[in-house]
Amino acid sequence: MATGDDERTDGERTDDGRDVAPGDGRDETATERFDRNWEELLQELRVVQTGVQILAGFLLTLPFQARFTVLEPHHRVIYLVAFCLALLATALLAAPVSAHRLLFRRHAKRELVAFGNRCAQGGMVSLALSLLAVLYLIVEVLLGTPAAVTAIVVGAAVFLALWVMLPMRMGRAAGHAGSPPPSRSSS
């Protein structure tokens, strides 16, 4: 998520009106930076929370379906793992909002942004693992164990590529370590 890199204030911890990271293309104080980071984090959480809630809601209904009782015992265990991971993802992705309510007006935005970032990362890992467990369960029931193993290996590779490797590559290409941002032209 974007907030991880933007938390950096280049060692400056004051909010005396000076730009906290000169040369980064932004003219903002530490307070403004943490406010922006918090808003960006909330927007990211809004996007992912809806999908996690739909997944958890869908998984909630499965045990009450007539065919659920004919699943093999190990399929029920896989289902339970997927469901618990979806609940964990829900809890982690909602935790920053709860923390904000508890820390409201206590001047702890820096801590809130750092906590929210960690929760968002943990929530994304839990979401990916839950989806992989659901993928494994569905493919194993339909096509058998070899196909299910292949499916989760491919699924895990997709998550790693899209959620970790490509963003890291983009970060390196953008020159995380201080290259100036592209200039804005007025054309």
Image (cartoon, rainbow, N blue to C red):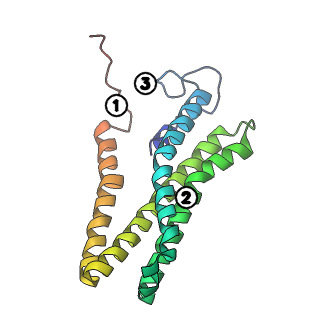
The residue singled out by tag 2 in the image is: 90
Q: Could you classify mark 2 by the number of other residues whose Cα lies within 10 Å: few (under 14), some (14-19), or many (20 or more)?
A: many
Which picture quadrant has residue 185?
top left
In the image, residue 103 above or below residue 30: below
Task: Pick whichever of labels 3 and 1 is earlier in the sequence.
Answer: 3
Residue 183 is left or right of residue 32, and the answer is left
The residue singled out by tag 3 in the image is: 23
Q: At 46% from the left edge and 45% from the top edge, which residue is drawn?
A: 47
Q: Could you classify mark 3 by the number of other residues whose Cα lies within 10 Å: few (under 14), some (14-19), or many (20 or more)?
A: few
Q: Residue flagged by tag 1: what amino acid is it?
A: Ser
- Where does the image place residue 53, in percent across and percent down from the top left? 51, 56
As measured in the structure, the alpha-carbon distance from the residue carrying label 3 to the one carrying label 1 is 8 Å
Which of the pair 163/14 is nearer the observer?
A: 163
Extreme top residue here? Answer: 187
* Nearest to viewer (mark 2 / mark 1): 2
Q: Residue flagged by tag 3: what amino acid is it?
A: Gly
Q: At 42% from the left edge and 83% from the top edge, which residue is drawn?
A: 75
Q: Are marks 3 and 1 in contact (CB under 8 Å)?
A: no
- Where does the image place residue 87, in percent across and percent down from the top left? 55, 64
In the image, residue 15 above or below residue 134: above
Residue 155 is left or right of residue 78, and the answer is left
Q: Are marks 3 and 2 in contact (CB under 8 Å)?
A: no
The residue singled out by tag 1 in the image is: 179
Secondary structure state at the residue bearing disc 3: loop
Give the number of the disc on residue 108. none
Q: Quadrant of the C terminus?
A: top left
- Where does the image place residue 5, in percent across and percent down from the top left? 46, 41
Residue 75 is left or right of residue 34, and the answer is left
As measured in the structure, the alpha-carbon distance from the residue carrying label 2 to the one carrying label 1 is 37 Å
Which picture quadrant has residue 34?
top right
Q: Residue flagged by tag 2: what amino acid is it?
A: Thr
